[in-house]
Image (tube, rainbow, N blue to C red):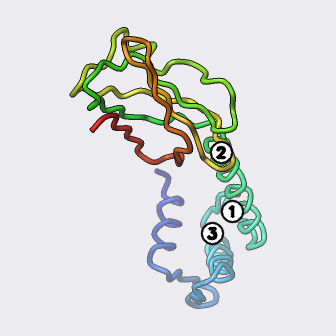
């Protein structure tokens, strides 16, 4: 690390910078005080990287831009999220198919057990990944199909993104 960089970091941590021409720099505890410290360091002959020579307004603008970028990523992940779902079978029968669909939809979509290559026996559980575009009210219908083809449907199930979801079928 160059000596100038170390001096700058050290001065920022100790909150006091000595300026041989004008005495010690004052610490205001605000962004304006930081600007004065950078100016004092420059007068003392310390090389200041260009990134540190920014105004308070520029700092506020950079923070706003970073916040906007972070919020846009959060919105995208909430709109299309992958959820880990644990399905526990206490029904006394084998469950071979499992579906989740938005309550307002007329299509069940893909079987979430399709990649398991087997049915889930009584007393067992399976963990599956559900990738679904969140609907506005977070209300879904859940359907499971037994080995003999009979099915059961649970309507109006609230599934919140980012929460652990466990479905227990049976007693």
Q: CA distance from mark 1 to mark 2?
A: 16 Å
Q: Could you tell whether 77 is left or right of 10 in the image?
A: right
The mark nearer the N terminus, 3 or 2, is 3
> Label 1's element?
helix
User: Residue 117 at what x, y percent from top left?
Assistant: 37, 8
Q: Nearer the viewer, mark 3 or mark 2?
A: 2
Residue denoted by label 2? 73
Q: Residues within 10 Å of mark 3 (few under 14, many from 20)?
A: few
Residue farthest along the top direction in this orientation: 117
User: Residue 153 at what x, y percent from top left?
Assistant: 50, 32
Q: Nearer the viewer, residue 138 or 105?
A: 105
Q: Nearer the viewer, mark 3 or mark 1?
A: 1
Quarter of the image holding residue 139? Answer: top right
Q: Nearer the viewer, mark 1 or mark 2?
A: 2
Q: Nearer the viewer, residue 160 or 3?
A: 160
Q: Nearer the viewer, residue 95 or 55?
A: 95
Residue denoted by label 3? 45
Instruction: Name above or below for residue 38 compared with residue 83.
Output: below
> Which numbered tag is attached to residue 96?
none
Q: CA distance from mark 3 to mark 2?
A: 42 Å
> Label 3's element?
loop
Residue denoted by label 1? 63
Instruction: Name above or below for residue 120 compared with residue 40.
Output: above
Q: CA distance from mark 3 to mark 1?
A: 30 Å
Which image quadrant: the C terminus?
top left
């Amino acid at each position: 690390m160059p000596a100038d960089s170390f001096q700058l970091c050290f001065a920022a941590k100790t909150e006091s910078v000595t300026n041989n021409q004008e005495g010690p720099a004052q610490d205001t505890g605000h962004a304006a005080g930081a600007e004065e410290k950078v100016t004092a360091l420059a007068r003392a002959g310390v090389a200041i990287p260009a990134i540190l020579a920014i105004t308070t307004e520029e700092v506020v603008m950079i923070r706003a831009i970073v916040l906007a970028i972070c919020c846009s990523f959060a919105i995208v992940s909430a709109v299309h999220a992958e959820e880990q779902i644990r399905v526990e079978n206490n029904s006394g029968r084998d469950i071979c198919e499992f579906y989740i669909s938005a309550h307002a939809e007329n299509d069940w979509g893909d079987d979430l057990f399709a990649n398991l290559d087997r049915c889930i026996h009584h007393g067992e559980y399976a963990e599956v990944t559900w990738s679904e575009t969140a609907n506005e009210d977070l209300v879904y219908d859940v359907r499971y199909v037994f080995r003999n083809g009979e099915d059961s449907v649970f309507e109006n199930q609230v599934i919140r993104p980012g929460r652990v979801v466990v479905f227990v079928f049976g007693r």
